[in-house]
Every structure is written in C-alpha cells, then in structure tokens.
Amino acid sequence: MHLKKGVAVSPGISIRPAYVLDTEELSIPKRNIESSQVQAALERYRKARQAAVEELQALQHRVEIQLGKELSGIFKAHQMLIEDPTMCAQVEKRITDELHSPEYAVTRSYRNAAKRMQSIGDRIFAERVRDIWDVENRLVRHLVGERLEEFRSLSEDVILIAVDLSPSQTAGLDKEKTLGFATDQGGRTSHTAIVAKALGIPAVVGLGNITSEVNNGDLVIIDGRKGIVIVDPDEPTLADYRNKERLYRAFQSELSEIRDLPAETIDGYRIHMWANIESPEEIEHALANGAEGIGLYRTEFLYVNKPEPSEEDHFSAYKRSIELLHGRPIVIRTLDLGGDKFFVEESVTPEKNPFLGCRSIRYCFEHLNVFKTQLRAILRASAYGPVRIMIPMISSMMELMRVHMILDDVRNELDDRGVPYDRSIPLGIMVEVPSAAIVADQLSKKIDFFSVGTNDLVQYTLAVDRVNERVANLYQPIDPSVIRLVTNVIEVGRDMKIPVSMCGEMCGEVEYTLPLIGLGLFHLSLAPAMIPEVKAVIRSISMREAKDLVRTIRNSVDPRRTERYLKEKVRKIIPQLF
Ligand code: PEP
Ligand code: MG
C-alpha cells in the first residue's frame, strides 16, 4: 500500500483500477511495466513506428508535389531516424531489459541521441538535434494517441492517472468511464481541476510523480475531499473506503432532495446559485442540480474543437444555451485565452510568463477581429433571451473604456444592418486582478455588475501561480489580503447599487460558504456538481452566524489555521461533508 497527498480539487471517493495516460505535450515520466507486459509494449512501439513512417511518407509525397524534392527530403531523413536500426534496438532494449514503458523508452533513447549531437558543438549537428526532437514527438504522439483510442474502447470504469490533462484531452475523454483523476501537476484552480469539478468526479492534482508510481491496472483509491490517493490499498483500508464510498453516495442522493428548495439561510436570507459552464452540453446537468442561471460561460472552450471558431459557431453555441435555459439568465464571458487555456497554438508566440502576458482581454485587444466576431455573436444571441456580457482580466479604467468603444462599434455595425439585439444588454467585468478590486469605485461608473474571479485574484494578489503544484500550499483564498479586496468590491457594489457576484472555484468549496455569505455575497456561481452541497450548508446556517464568523477570521494572520477552523465548523453542521 502506498499513500500520496496532493491538492484536493473535487470531492468524492472512487475505488477503481488505474489507467495511466502520458501527455504528448508534456514531459514523459519514468514509468515501468511488468515483465508480462513486455511483448505488448514492444508491439505498441512497433505499431507507432509504422504509423509514424506512413505519416511521413504521405507528408514527403505531398511536399514533393507542392514544393519540390529538396524540401521534401527532410521527411525522408525523419523516416530514416525512426527506422535507424541502432535507435530501434536501443528503444527495444530499454523496454525488454529495463522494463521501461514504450513512451519513456522512446523519449530517453532519442533525448540521449540529441544530447550526444549537441555536445559536438557544430552548427550542422545542432540543426540535427531539432530533427531528433521532432521524431521523438511524432513517435510519442502516436503512442499516446493509440492509448487514448484504447482508453475510449475500454469496457471498465477507471481512474485516470496523467502528468496533467490538456484541455483537448479532457474534451475527448469518455466521461462515463472516467471515475476519477489523479495528476502529477496542477493546483486548485488549474484546468483539470475545473473539469473534474464540472463532471462531478473525485480528483486530486499536484501529486508530483504519481505517473511513475502507478502501473496500469493497479487498484487506486481517490479521496477527493482530503486530497489523498492510495495505491494498492491493504484490506482494512479498502474495507474502510468501500464503506466511506457507500456513505458518500447515500449522502449525495439525500442532497438531490433539496434540489428544488431555495438556497435560503435559517433566518431567511436568499442566496442565488448560478452555475459555471464550459459548453452548452453542461446546462442540463446544471439545471438538474438546481442552478438558477449561468453565472460564467467560459467561451474560450469553443476553441477546443476548432482553432478559429466562426461568428456562426459562437452564435449557435450561445443561442442553444439560451434555449436550454428557458428564460433563465446567462453571463457570457468574452474570450479568456492565454494562461493555461490557450488553443490557438500556431498563431501565438510562446511567452515566458503567460499569466502576466498577452492573456484574455489583452489578447482580444491585439486581435480585434476575433473580439468583434464574438461580440457580434453575443449581441445577436441576446435577441433570443436574457444575456449579459462579462469581460475578463480588466485591470484599469482605460481598458474598460476601450471595451466600450469596441462594443459601440459592433452595435453600430449591427444597427446599420438592421440586426436585432438587446439594446440594454448588461455589461459587467470580472474582478480578478487586484488593481480592479482597488479601483472598483472608478470602474463601477461604467458597468452594470461585478463578478469576483477568485481563481485569478488569489493568484495575482499572493503572486502564487495557480497551476504550479510546488507553490500550491501558498494558494490561500482566505488570506486577509484577498478578503480585504473582495470586501472593497462588495462595499462599492452596495454604495453604487451594482450587483456583485462571485464565480471563482472558492464558491464551490463548502468551507468557504459561511464566510462568503457573511461578507455579503448573495450571488454565487459555481461548478454544477457542487451546488447541492453548498446549498445544504446555506440552508443550515444563519446570516448572523456568518457575519460573526467573518468578524472572527477577518484579521487572522494564519490562513491555514483559518481554513482548518472553517472545515471544523462545516463538519459540525454537516458531518458527512468532511
Ligand atoms: C477566476 O479567475 O476566478 C475565474 C472564474 O476564471 P478562470 O478560472 O476561467 O480564469
Ligand atoms: Mg480568471
């Protein structure tokens, strides 16, 4: 038995065999296979080799016709590198003698070859290094792609183990068969965490090297609330967790009974529960969990399937969402590309510091066509139901003024063409950069609502990368600095009579429900699967108690202690939660 602690991101208990998936874009971890798996591993490698060669032959042929023989020669050279007898023998030896997974065997063999080339220090040889990397990537892509195919045709339920999951990988997962995630990388608000929560499956991220420590088929327990993963549990542990899993299921079905009841405190304060979604497909699930509207539609996920969605792609996704909501409101956030959710790879130069770079609204300002296309689609969709526009990453009044100018342009265009849209469509901003929280009084003059995005607000306030597991313990949503910023926005909203909601992952973590209500937030937007739990807490507390609690913790200098205290408090209210 082997227990590992990581970052708890999506609650629940799952006990299933592991399915280990490497990710082509990320480094391949060292992973061993059983000796009984050697033959199958060799066959996988040979199949990938064959597929890569066939792909290169086709490429060579195409380039030769279009650009001539000289340029197509490069692909011939790549084929030779793949079929090089010394390289093939090296990879196979690693698989057979050292029991390396085929992915790891390929990576090690080709990287060693690249290192040898690099050490020669000659320009021609240095160029060859790039070819070796290319070949390595191609082979790994085939190996990983084949595993994904294999995963899709699995008949049993599994827990997926990976370095991290790219947005396109998560989009392609068989959601019915994936009953848990455990990853090496990531933090509380990384994309894998958000997806796991949206799907309502237990997940633990930031485990460091789980991919090297688990083999396919090993029995794994995930405790998504405690952030624990147990590999090969002993009998007593397994029995204990089977019992916990049963109790958790029973509790979840009890929760479904409060689905249609209001989220109201004991002393009659009504809280509005909205849902965060990444695609219209999630709306049905959100409504089934009691969502009263969509408080955050992360539209950048339109880019998962298409590098450049057209105006019609945007429009049909929005119109479909509006229809599915039957009159309930939807907040459509404009593109938040960049940071850890970038899909337009070819068109973007890699940045050294993407979270502080040309992300989100900054990207939209740089790509006005992309931004205007989306705004046009949102405005057109607003003719069909209650839509609000939300702009991410606003950090100053000048940026907000620029958004207004662009939006006016788009409005004028539609007016000229006589296209109908909601003329009083509300425009709001996410407060996720500290500067926006500080100058909320200025910004409030030009908007209709604020929505606090704690995922980024915590990251930028505390200078803690939200997806880096090495600093995950410093990522503290309840830090007094964050609380002060949120309080400022709430007070401005109250003074200026502008609604303030919150849509960060913090809203879906039950230990924060009491303080958020106590701070004066009446609109929460969260992952659909978390709505019932949070509602259960709200229905068991009073506003007075929530306000008292805020007074107690407001100036605490030790956020980790505060967090333990908050968990204890919730456990007393609903013991099944912790
Ligand atoms: C946030 O930053 O809190 C947020 C909700 O947006 P995202 O997680 O998509 O950056
Ligand atoms: Mg954000």
Image (cartoon, rainbow, N blue to C red):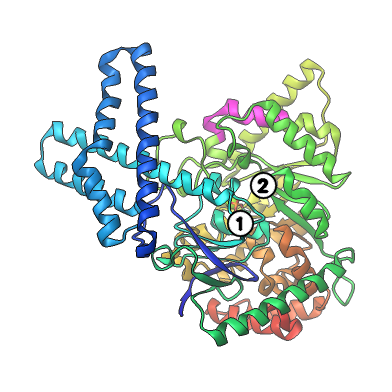
Figure check: 54 above or below 274:
above
Which amino acid, by three-letter code, is at mark 1?
A: Ile
Of the two numbered discs 1 and 2 on the same chain, state the one appearing first in sequence: 1
Q: Quadrant of the C terminus?
A: bottom right
Tell which of 539 and 440 is nearer to you: 539
Three-letter code for the amino acid on which mark 2 is drawn: Glu
Residue 109 seen anywhere in this rendered image of the structure: yes
Kindly check if marks 1 and 2 are in contact, taking CB atoms under 8 A apart as contact: yes
Residue 507 got which mark?
none
Relative side of 257 to 153, left or right? right
**Could you say which quadrant of the image residue 93 lies in?**
bottom left
Q: Position of residue 116 (x, y in %)?
A: 14, 46
Which residue is painted at 28% across and 37% down in the image?
A: 82
Q: Which residue bears the numbered disc 1?
A: 194
In depth, the one of 98 and 300 nearer the eye is 98
Residue 332 position in % (x across, y down): 72, 42
| Residue 253 drawn in magenta | no
Q: Does 374 appear in magenta? A: yes
Some atom of ligand 1 lies within 8 Å of the CB belonging to the residue at label 1: yes
Residue at (40% x, 47% y) in the render: 44
What residue is shown at x 66% (from left), y 68% (from top)? 509
Name the residue beneath numbered marker 2: 278
Q: Residues within 10 Å of mark 2 (few under 14, many from 20)?
A: some
State the extent of the magenta-drawn residues as a range. Answer: 364-377
Q: How far from the left and from the top, in percent, is residue 129?
A: 22, 38
